[in-house]
Image (cartoon, coloured by chain):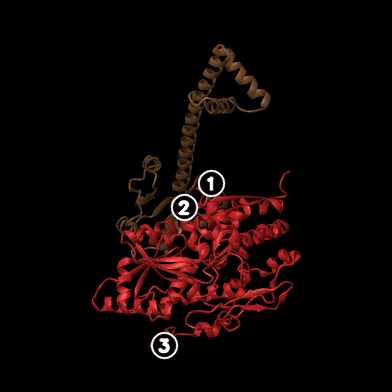
């Protein structure tokens, strides 16, 4: 006898992250996946969907409301408990560190839910990595811009070539044990103070 | 010089995290050799989870929350103790303009008097029920919160059954004002500045306040992982001394401007300093132009505000029993009582020569006026600490208190 596939509800205000989770669940063969971005009217949605597993991001400020509803609400026909509560310490830590929590209906066997939580954890981590890389790329671009401006200031005010200007920035950074972008930023700021037309 | 102690703490963006914030930002923790790292959280569930797995050693918590953890009423419950209270009072009950108009028509005045406003609310609720209208919906921040218990206590004393005659839902503090303005709720009980936020927006009226429902009553506490406290007694004592000095600094009117500016920063509340004036001064705008100065509205330090009274823990426990969250037993009662740890407070603060209460529990409601009490060393003033309905809570007579069935005040 084939077991009925689990109904999974993903509550996440972050649309991109929610799609990543949803895609992962579908790839893993879960067909009944519902994604909700806004908790307004969530009790009615839960009553309609009757989810077996609910995945929520930890940044969601409505966790207290949701937990209270899982315990008390008449629309939630089956009691829902926090999954990691019954799981091992390593899973708990991995979930909290990844920023995700999962709730399951009472009586659901752990081995049926564990792969869903593990998948959510890895997708949450992948999303954070992606966001971090994007942020790094953005600040790298900013740094390059400010270094270019600092080089320009040195080239004009000291008559240096572009290479010589960059070498001066690099040497100053090394001698002060700071980043080139920090030295460049200081120079741009100072130049702006000395000559408001400069920056 | 490297700090002697590293401590990680969580907090929720509410004004009553001020003592922790001041300890970290004004330098009281550093002076005790503590590197105190504060992390802002978005829900009490997150605070609980991060305490459970050891991300946080301690946190800003709702007074009943550590008791609920120790009683196993929440997921991921872990042993948590309370060696320090972060203040008394600070909450209000705010209602929509429409509900206020209905209450005013039944005799409510902008005087915050819990008996009068409660009687008016009761009359309105019974009139609505008679007309077959939906019950009013109120919001609190958490089922295990002073807000939930004081709202229910107030309503029940005014002849309203909070479990049947109204609906109580959970809404996070920063969303209260929006939910009220959008008509999703009719009223709420929350800490400042989220009441003044509705008043300033012109969408709500403050009907009554915690400081009048139960004078000098407990609110947020310092919840500490028991395992951490047992392993690091010196770090804990040092932190309690830092918090003691931070609390005294927060209470001093001379520091109000600096404290408001500090809490206004984006990493703490991220709200204008002007919104924090009401809780600092106790001078509240109630809505519709009415204003009132409330005595002891919020006390971060005075009146032994930081002492973790066992009678406070036990009162919270009686409310958990009263509203069906836990069954009464001697074992449960002992767990609740042992959650609050005045012994650790005494050990940490005795070397400073500060005023310490003579007992670990008190009869709540016994003091009808501010009273100097005998204490070890310096002088200490307690009270008034009464409930608005005149009931007394004697922590030595819990069974009698739990046996009370008719909580409504006599009418007329």
Question: Residue B70: x and y, percent?
Answer: 57, 66
- Distance in Å between CA atoms under marks 1 and 3: 54 Å
Residue B157, labelled with which disc? none
Is residue B199 or residue B361 the one in the foreground?
B199
Q: Which chain is red?
A: B
Chain letter of mark 1 equals: A
Kindly tell me whether residue B143 is visible in this rendering.
no
Q: How many marks?
A: 3
Q: Secondary structure at mark 1?
A: helix
Residue B272, labelled with which disc? 2
Residue at label 3? Answer: B410
Question: Residue B396: x and y, percent?
Answer: 61, 82
In the shown orientation, is residue B314 left or right of residue B276? right
Q: Which chain is brown?
A: A
Looking at the image, is A128 positioned above or below residue B296? above
Q: Nearer the viewer, mark 3 or mark 2?
A: 2
Q: Secondary structure at mark 3?
A: loop
Residue at label 1? Answer: A97
Question: Residue B213: x and y, percent?
Answer: 47, 75
């Amino acid at each position: 006898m084939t077991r009925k596939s689990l109904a999974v509800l993903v509550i996440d205000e972050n649309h991109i992250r929610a799609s990543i989770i949803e895609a992962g669940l579908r790839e893993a063969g879960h067909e009944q996946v519902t994604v909700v971005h806004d908790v307004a009217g969530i009790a009615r949605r839960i009553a309609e969907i009757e989810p077996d597993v609910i995945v929520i991001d930890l940044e969601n400020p409505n966790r207290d409301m949701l937990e209270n509803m899982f315990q008390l609400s008449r629309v939630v026909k089956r009691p829902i408990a926090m999954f990691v509560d019954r799981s091992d310490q390593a899973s708990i830590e991995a979930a909290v560190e990844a920023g995700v929590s999962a709730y399951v209906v009472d009586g659901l066997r752990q081995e049926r839910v564990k792969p869903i939580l593990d998948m959510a954890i890895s997708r949450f981590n992948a999303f954070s990595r992606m966001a971090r890389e994007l942020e790094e790329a953005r600040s790298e671009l900013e740094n390059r811009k400010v270094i270019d401006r600092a080089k320009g200031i040195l080239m004009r005010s000291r008559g240096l070539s572009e290479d010589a200007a960059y070498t001066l920035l690099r040497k100053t950074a090394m001698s002060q044990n700071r980043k080139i972008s920090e030295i460049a930023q200081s120079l741009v700021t100072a130049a702006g103070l000395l000559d408001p037309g400069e920056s | 010089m490297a700090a002697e102690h590293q401590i990680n703490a969580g907090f929720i963006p509410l004004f009553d995290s001020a003592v922790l914030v001041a300890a970290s930002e004004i330098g009281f923790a550093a002076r005790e050799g503590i590197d105190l790292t504060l992390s802002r959280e978005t829900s009490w569930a997150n605070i609980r989870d991060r305490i459970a797995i050891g991300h946080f050693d301690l946190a800003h918590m709702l007074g009943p929350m550590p008791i609920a953890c120790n009683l196993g009423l929440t997921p991921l419950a872990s042993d948590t103790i309370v060696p320090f209270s972060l203040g008394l009072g600070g909450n209000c009950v705010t209602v929509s303009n429409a509900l206020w108009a209905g209450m005013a028509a039944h005799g409510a005045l902008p005087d915050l008097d819990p008996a009068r406003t409660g009687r008016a609310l009761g009359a309105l609720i019974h009139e609505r029920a008679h007309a077959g209208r939906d019950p009013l919906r109120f919001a609190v921040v958490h089922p295990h919160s002073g807000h939930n218990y004081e709202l229910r206590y107030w309503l029940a004393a005014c002849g309203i059954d909070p479990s049947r005659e109204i609906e109580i839902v959970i809404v996070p503090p920063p969303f209260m004002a929006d939910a009220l303005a959008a008509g999703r709720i009719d009223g709420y009980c929350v800490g400042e500045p989220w009441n003044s936020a509705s008043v300033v927006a012109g969408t709500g009226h403050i009907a009554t306040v915690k400081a009048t429902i139960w004078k000098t009553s407990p609110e947020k506490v310092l919840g500490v992982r028991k395992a951490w406290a047992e392993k690091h007694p010196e770090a804990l004592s040092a932190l309690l001394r830092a918090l003691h000095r931070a609390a005294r600094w927060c209470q001093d009117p001379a520091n109000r401007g600096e404290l408001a500016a500090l809490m206004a920063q984006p990493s703490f509340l991220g709200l204008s300093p002007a919104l924090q004036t009401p809780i600092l001064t106790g001078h509240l705008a109630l809505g519709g132009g009415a204003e009132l100065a409330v005595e002891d509205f919020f006390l971060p330090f005075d009146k032994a505000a930081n002492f973790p009274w066992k009678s406070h823990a036990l009162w919270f426990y009686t409310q958990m029993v009263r509203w069906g969250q836990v069954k009464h037993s001697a074992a449960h009662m002992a767990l609740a009582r042992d959650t609050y740890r005045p012994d650790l407070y005494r050990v940490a603060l005795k070397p400073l020569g500060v005023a310490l209460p003579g007992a670990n529990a008190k009869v709540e409601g016994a003091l009808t006026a501010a009273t100097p009490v005998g204490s070890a060393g310096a002088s200490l003033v307690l009270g008034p600490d009464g409930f608005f309905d005149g009931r007394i809570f004697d922590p030595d007579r819990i069974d009698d208190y739990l046996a009370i069935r008719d909580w409504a005040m006599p009418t007329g």
